[in-house]
Amino acid sequence: MGMRDLTEGILDILLFLIIGGICLSIGFGFVFSMTRDIDEIKHFISDKSVQLENNYIDNNSYDDSLSGFEVILLTQVQDNNMPFPRKYKVYSYEQDVFPSYREDLIPFGVQVYNQLKGSDPTLLGRYEIKYSYGSTDSSSDDYYYIERK
């Protein structure tokens, strides 16, 4: 009886190892193929010559600047979760972002559009967002300002 239990135990362990080996080899095959696919996608995304090969002209800028349309869009997506100070300025137009800001988005967008259109009729110029610390005597608050690059 003792020898039979020992044989069954060894067979159980052997069967476990065989099934485990099969599962591991299949699992590693999936992992490596997914890793290879991800590496190819990352290479495709980081390859900026793709636009030249496919006759695709990319007008995006890879620096920190925004187009006029992106500035307008940026002012439209702000809400009460905007970082402090909740205020931005585009040329002479200054706007506080308050809790009910989202209710009046169209007039605010039109104001920003008019400010940008006055200095750049095509809105194709590049703009950057900067931070103004206001003044030390508390006569003006801090704000984000958007200026042409």
Image: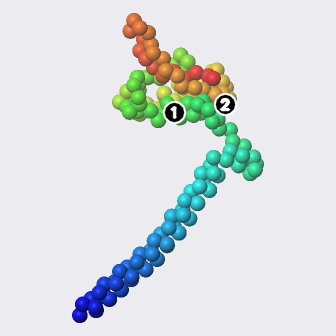
Q: Is residue 39 above or below residue 28?
A: above
Asked if residue 114 can be seen in this view, the reply is no
* Residue 63 in which image quadrant: top right
Residue 37, given in percent of the width and then of the height, sits at 58, 60
The image shows residue 149 at horizontal and vertical percentages of 63, 23
In the rendering, at what x and y percent does residue 85 appear? 40, 23
Disc 1 to disc 2, C-alpha distance: 15 Å
Q: What's under tag 2, amino acid-wise?
A: Leu
Q: Is residue 72 above or below residue 2?
A: above
In-front residue for pair 5/62: 5
- Residue visible at 45% across and 20% down in the picture: 143
Using residue 19 as the reference point, say whether residue 124 is left or right of it.
right
Residue highlighted by disc 2: 124
Dot 2 falls on a residue whose secondary structure is: loop
Relative to 109, is 7 above or below?
below
Count residues near mark 2 (Cα–Cα under 10 Å), then give few for <14, some for 14-19, many for 20+.
few
The quarter of the picture where residue 58 lies is top right
Q: Is residue 43 above or below residue 67?
A: below
Residue behind mark 1: 74
Q: Nearer the viewer, residue 67 or 36?
A: 36
Q: How many marks?
A: 2
Residue at the spot 41% in from the left edge and 15% down from the top edge: 141
Query: What residue sits 64% from the left and 52% below the top?
Result: 44
Within 10 Å of disc 1 (Cα), the crowding (few <14, some 14-19, many 20+) is: few
Left/right placement of residue 1 relative to residue 100 reads left
Q: Give the residue type that dot 1 points to.
A: Leu
